[in-house]
Structures are given as structure tokens and as C-alpha cells.
Amino acid sequence: MSKVTFLGGGSFGTALAVLLAEKDNCVSIYDRDIDVVNEINNKRTNEKYLKDLKIPQGVTAFNNIDDAIKDAEYIVLSVPSHVIRLMCKQIKGKIQSDIPVISIAKGIEEGTDKRLSVVMEEELNNPIVVLSGPSHAEEVAMKIPTTVVTSSKDMRCAMDIQDLFMTNYFRVYTNDDLIGVEIGGAVKNIIALAAGIVDGLGYGDNTKAALITRGMKEITRVGMVLGGRIETFYGLTGMGDLIVTCTSMHSRNRRAGLLIGKGMNVDDAIKEVGMVVEGVSACKAFFELKERLGISMPITDGLYRGLFENKTPEVIVNELMSRDKKSELF
């Protein structure tokens, strides 16, 4: 039995906390929302994020971060990408240096364009592990078969986390391409947001297939420039995650895009979804990155102009379809 602390009581963190508690681990959840904390402890539910999920007694919620991390053997950062640095600062110096810190967020840091593992390394001296892949919290909570990946600079630690989370419905692979794992998980949010817009516009399967396929091209193009391996992008944290987020209504990025495609503005769409839509910040970050590095990412470019320069989706689609002819392979 291990003591595991989740910093953040959102949907995926809660689903994984229940998974670990059902493996007889002692699990703590820190959340800044006292209502979430009280509901977990008193009603054994977290209706704000996961409806109809029964939370076992092995999970205890805290509103004080120091109480939550006391005696922890593993720390899981179950917060959005823009909160990762803040969470690391809050636990810095309060945990032993050999305790693995695991990120389940997907994105890069706004303003610095740094991968989340790099942000964590800058703040902590602990082993850093990333857990990523096609894994909607709603389906994990229902014990629907799911596969994910752990990655780290210390692959022994990644294998330790593999053992920690592995169950008969949650299969965990390892991959030593940390850059590829993180970049695939971040860029797919951009394409999923665009996929939702395509659905909102009423386009069909032909359009969705084209978007996903050309979206994979953008993922591999920027990912390889940044140092990732192509086989990673055609694996679970690239293609796998792209498929699930572009096609499922569990995807907050697709849901937000769907609302935007139907005419809602970006801020109202995010408010309607009710959770962080990582594709918005990822689009801004990767637009700036591709401009700086001279990388061709036309879907990202078009989405940026729609989100931040008020171009209509119809105009963006027309511009994408009317570009100069070229070979598919380049």
C-alpha cells in the first residue's frame, strides 16, 4: 500500500484517485474548493466533475495542501497546465527529494512555451514523470478499458508509476521519448478544438478525416523539430489521443469548438463547458512557437486567427482549402 496525494480534485484526478484507492492505496486529494472537499469526505461523490461516481473510503480530501502532502510517497499534479508551476512552488521544500512527482496535464506553459516537465524540473529536485494518453476521465471512472503511457528522464521511475496505476482496465505502457509524449498531448488539443468547430459548422466525415490526418502532420512536424520521435506521434500520446479528443463528446476541447462553430464566442464557449479548455492556450503558444521557428502549421494558424483575430470559421476553412497546391508528403 502506498500513500498518494493528488493536487487538484478535477475529473481525471478524481478518477485516478478512485482507481488507486481500489488497489488498496491510501489516497489524499487537495482542492482549493472547500465544497468539493466536503462533498468528497461527507457524501463520497464529486458531482461537479464526475457524476454518479462513488468515491471509496480510501480517499480523503483536504483543503490544506500541507495536510494533503504529509507522508506522501507519490505526488500527482492533477491541475491544468497553467497551474503546474504554482503547484510546484507550493510543495517546494516540503517533500523529500526522492518522491516522484507525476503530471497528468497536457499542454505547455504560456509565456515561456516550456514543456510541463521542464517547468517542474525548474521548481523541484524530484523525479518527474508524465502520464499521458487517450483517457477521458468519465470512461476511466466507468472502468472502460483504457491505455496510457508513462515517460520520464528516469525510466526506472516511469516503470514504478506504470506498476502503481496498472489495472485490468487501465493498461500503462512506458515510452522514453519524453519530448514526444508531451508535445503530442499538447498539440492534439489544438486539433480537437478545430474538430469541434468543423462539427459545429455542420461539415461531415470527409472534413473530419482530413482535419485529423493533416492535424497529425502538424503534430509530427513541430514535434520532430522540438526533438520528439516520429514513432511516438503515431502512438498512444499522438494519434491515439488525437482520435479520442477529436471524436468524443467527453472532450472539453471538442465541445468548446462545437459551440464556437455554432456561433458562440470563445469566452462564452469556455464558460459553457465549465472546465479549462487547454486548446485555446495551446493554440496561442504553438502559434508563437511556429512563427519563431518557421514551422508550417496551417490549422494552428487558422485557428489562432479565429480565436484571437476574429476571423469567422467559414473564412478560415475557405483559406485552408484555397492554399497553393502541394504534395501530401510535405
Image (spheres, rainbow, N blue to C red):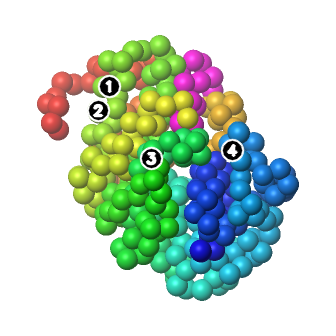
| Amino acid beneath label 1 | Ala
Callout 2–callout 1 Cβ contact below 8 Å: yes
Contact (CB < 8 A) between labels 2 and 3? no
Q: Residue at x 37, y 24 (%)?
A: 208
Q: Position of residue 173 (x, y in %)?
A: 36, 59
Secondary structure beneath label 2:
helix
Residue at the spot of label 2: 213
Q: Is residue 214 visible?
A: yes
- The residue that disc 3 covers is 146
Q: Disc 3 on helix, strand or loop?
A: strand
Label count reads 4
**Marks 2 and 1, how far apart in space?**
6 Å
Q: Residues within 10 Å of mark 3 (few under 14, many from 20)?
A: some
Choose the circle earlier in sequence order: 4 or 2.
Answer: 4
Task: Tell me the amino acid under the disc marked 3.
Answer: Thr
Residue 66 % position (x, y): 75, 76
Q: Is residue 56 left or right of residue 180?
A: right
